[in-house]
Amino acid sequence: MRRIGTQDGLFNGGDPATNTKGTVVTDDWLNAVQEELAGVVEGLGGTLDPLDNGQLFDWLLASFAMKSGSVTQLFRAATAVGSSDVVPLAQVQSLIAGVNNNPYGFYKRESGSQAFTKTGASTISVKAGVVAIVGSTKVSAAVDTAIVMPALTAGTDYAIYACTDGTVRADASFTAPTGYTTETSRLIGGFHYGLVAPGTTVAGGSFATTDNGMIWTQADVDLIAGINAWSIWDLRWRASSNDSLLRAQKGFTFVNGLWVANYLCSTDHIANGLSKAGTNIASGTVLPKKPLAFGGDGTVTYPNMNWWTANEIVRAYGAKLMRESLFVDAAFGVTENQSIDSTAATYPTTQRNAGYTSKYGLEQASGHHYTWGEDTGQFYDTTTWSWKAVNGGRGQVDTQGTYGLARVLLGGHRAHGVNSGSRSSYWSDSPWDSYWPMGVRAACDHLNLV
């Protein structure tokens, strides 16, 4: 590429007042610029169209879409192989189809928020300015555009796809929407359809309107009724996890810079992920499976639900346990100072029980099941320090007295009565303790790609 042949390489507009001449643009310079720009489109396999002023942009996007993971080389697409460094267009399209989770080839104007907006309990739109490359097809939204919706089921996660026919649509499949393939669609985001039914009112949903916690308004309920507005994500605004993107996002909600599980973890997190409606609840009596990353085989279970067990479960998927400061935020909105029931030692399933839903749509957020947290406490007294074999044979712990070390348990459990709530915390159990009310609610850091 060449610059204009002036002393400083820049154009000069001239100034009649000082008799300063402007830069003369020659035909050979303009021809060079034209060939440089046209060569990009043609070199990537395109045919110049004098009626399309967006071709350069389209083909540059297509070239970026060909990046995948550690692959940094851009493929040059052509309709026929002419040299060893040229890849046929059909082959490039096939490569793109296999990279549905790649953020390259997906662009939006607002990097600081999701690409989609909830417009109703069962409707959602794609924001103006969103562009997705599907194969060699550019799918774009010039204005906010309604997403084609399927029939929606409570407690289900939905993927959002851009399709080669120009539509953007949602589907419960995280492979391809009904009637499309991985070659004619591209996953670009998703959302969770929660357990608060469309049309739920503050009174009908038993949301708090008095007391010391959140005072709910209808607008607050509308945010989580049907489509959970806090759960909406896209390829550039999502949970950061070493787990599969599709598993990591399911059943999670964005809470002020952190993604938090809507549901308590089940025993079979290998199949269900860390957050799913309608599953059992892992506990000290309903024992969870060992993750594959920590020696599991899909069948073997832990012998307990102590802190180390809970921590291994979430860390296996790139998630973490919450600190108390994060939990009190995520659980805000529950009806404070109450617990669900003291008559049974185990609550059966992850479900909605009115009065225990948080502002962000977390279910059973308090008064059901303790969740282990990251915070640590120590007991200080005059007792002698000593080593204790309490962590499953992986070294020992040096503490004072019989216990000497605590990990926080959050939210209260079903038999705690008025002690449960969004700020409820229990500091009397050690990390090696395991009882029926101990469970897991995962959290994950936020990833915002600009």
Image (cartoon, grey):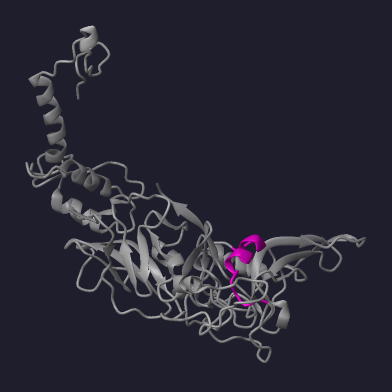
The image quadrant that residue 308 belongs to is: bottom right
Q: Give how far across and how far down residue 25 sits, in percent.
A: 13, 19
Q: Give how far across and how far down residue 281 sits, in percent.
A: 56, 80
Q: Residue at x 69, y 78 (%)?
A: 337
Looking at the picture, tell me which residue is in the foreground, 237 or 216: 216
Q: Residue at x 73, y 77 (%)?
A: 419
Relative horizontal placement of residue 81, taking residue 100 as reference (left or right): left
Q: How many marks?
A: 0
Vertical placement of residue 141 versus 170, above or below: above
Q: Residue at x 49, y 74 (%)?
A: 218
Let me know if residue 367 appears in the view. yes
**Magenta-drawn stretch contains 352:** no
Farthest residue to the bottom: give it. 343
Farthest residue to the front: give it. 17
Farthest residue to the right: give it. 382
Vertical placement of residue 96 versus 48, above or below: below
Looking at the picture, tell me which residue is in the foreground, 167 or 260: 167
Q: Give how far across and how far down residue 105 sits, in percent.
A: 28, 50
The image quadrant that residue 117 belongs to is: bottom left
Vertical placement of residue 231 versus 263, above or below: above
**Magenta-drawn stretch contains 327:** yes
Let me know if residue 391 appears in the view. no
The image quadrant that residue 358 belongs to is: bottom right
Relative horizontal placement of residue 248, taking residue 42 as reference (left or right): right
Q: What are the residue bounds of the magenta stretch? A: 321-336
Relative horizontal placement of residue 198, taking residue 212 as reference (left or right): left
Relative horizontal placement of residue 407, taking residue 124 as reference (left or right): right
Vertical placement of residue 376 versus 54, above or below: below
Looking at the picture, tell me which residue is in the foreground, 324 or 115: 115
Quadrant where the N terminus is found in the figure:
top left
